[in-house]
Amino acid sequence: MTRGTRILIGMVTILALLAGNAGAIDTTDGMRTLRSADVHPDDYPTVQAVQFMNQQIQKTSGRKLGIRVFSSGLLGDEGPLLQLVQSGELDMNRVSIQALDSIAPLSRVFSLPYLFRDTEHLHKVLDGPIGQEVLDSLASKGLIGLAYYDAGIRSIYTVKKPILKLEDMKDLNIRVQPSEMSLMVFDLLGARPVRLPFAQTARALNNDLVEAAENNLPSYSSTEHYKYAPIFSLTRHTMSPEVLVMSKISWDKLSQSEQVMLRKAARESVAVMRDMWQQREERVEATLKLAGVKFNELPKEQIARFTAAVQPVYARYASDPQQQNLIKRIRAIK
């Protein structure tokens, strides 16, 4: 399927979704169905986690309630879909935490570079009071935060030279996420950040438009970026999560028992997703090594230098007292 065909199908699907009483939860054969979207393909852990939720909810409700997942970006990109969720025209959406930056300032904290020490630290934060506090902050924006899903640890991959010290970042043309925070992070590291749509990254690497990019290991593999940039340097600069959100409008149409059921299924889906993600990372790393990818571990003293270099990001994007308090509490968790 070509990209143009996919876009056309997505537009037709969205028009069908919005036709008639779009704010109502679909009902088919006596089962009310929540509509959920994800840009990832069917076999991706986040999609599979919501499919798991569907199975649990159908079983618990006696097939009176379920979830239909529109995967592979069929309905479009995260930003526009998030607006549909807020307006109640779409029931659920799995989004990166960065997609919430502009509407939920507390969530922005989770995107800060070098905030989390490791995955264990991240999970302790997300699974505890801090994680729930950030989810709860979404309610005033028309969203119900249901669960956090792993998005892996982001590192840098390059076409020609490894990144082993801070000086290796100087004037490096690197594709970054289309966010102001990402631009600032890589500016501070001395690179030349280039904002490009994710779908254009492989071509940019292949045509020398950029000489580096950054992402988690499974995405690096599934997009085949390793064919153009076979050097993976473990900078581990961010490990921000993804979030499953639901429209508050749709949420309020559910009974209290259905809301409890949905929250329970969402919590249970987190463990399923994390297990799938860990297995995927291990499998992908082994496959990439066989394909000739060179992995480089940065010395601790260099990670410390990277961390120090990006500290101005905290003052720029998390200067609010509530955000500062959140950062302090996150760092205190052992």
Image (spheres, helix red, strand yellow):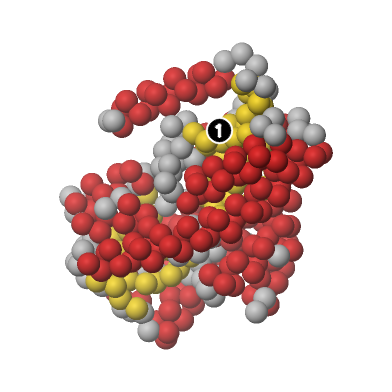
| Image location (x, y in percent) of residue 272 | 55, 56
Q: Which residue in the structure is indicated by mark 1? A: 68
- Residue 313 picture location, percent across and down: 53, 65
Q: How many marks?
A: 1
Q: Residue at x 60, y 52 (%)?
A: 269
State the residue in front, 82 or 283: 283
At label 1, the amino acid type is Arg
Percent x, y for residue 82?
57, 37
x 65%, y 79%: residue:
334
Q: Looking at the rendering, which quadrant does residue 295 occupy?
A: bottom left
- Quarter of the image with the N terminus in it: top left
Q: Is residue 228 left or right of residue 27?
A: left
Pick out the residue farthest to the right: 256
Give residue 301's quadrant in the image: bottom left
Q: Secondary structure at mark 1?
A: strand
Q: Please tell me how crowded label 1 is: few (under 14), some (14-19), or many (20+) other residues with Cα within 10 Å.
A: some
Towards the viewer: 328 or 90:
90
Front residue of 103/202: it is 202
Using the rendered view, name the quadrant where residue 121 is placed.
bottom right
User: Seen in the image, is 5 located left or right of residue 319?
Assistant: left
Q: Residue furthest top?
A: 20
Q: x and y percent of residue 250 in the render?
A: 70, 32
Examine the rendering and report whether any part of residue 128 can be seen: yes
Query: Residue at 33% of width from left, 66% of height from top?
Result: 285
Above or below residue 7? Residue 12 is above
Residue 305 visible, this orientation: no
At 62% from the left edge and 20% from the top edge, which residue is drawn? Answer: 29
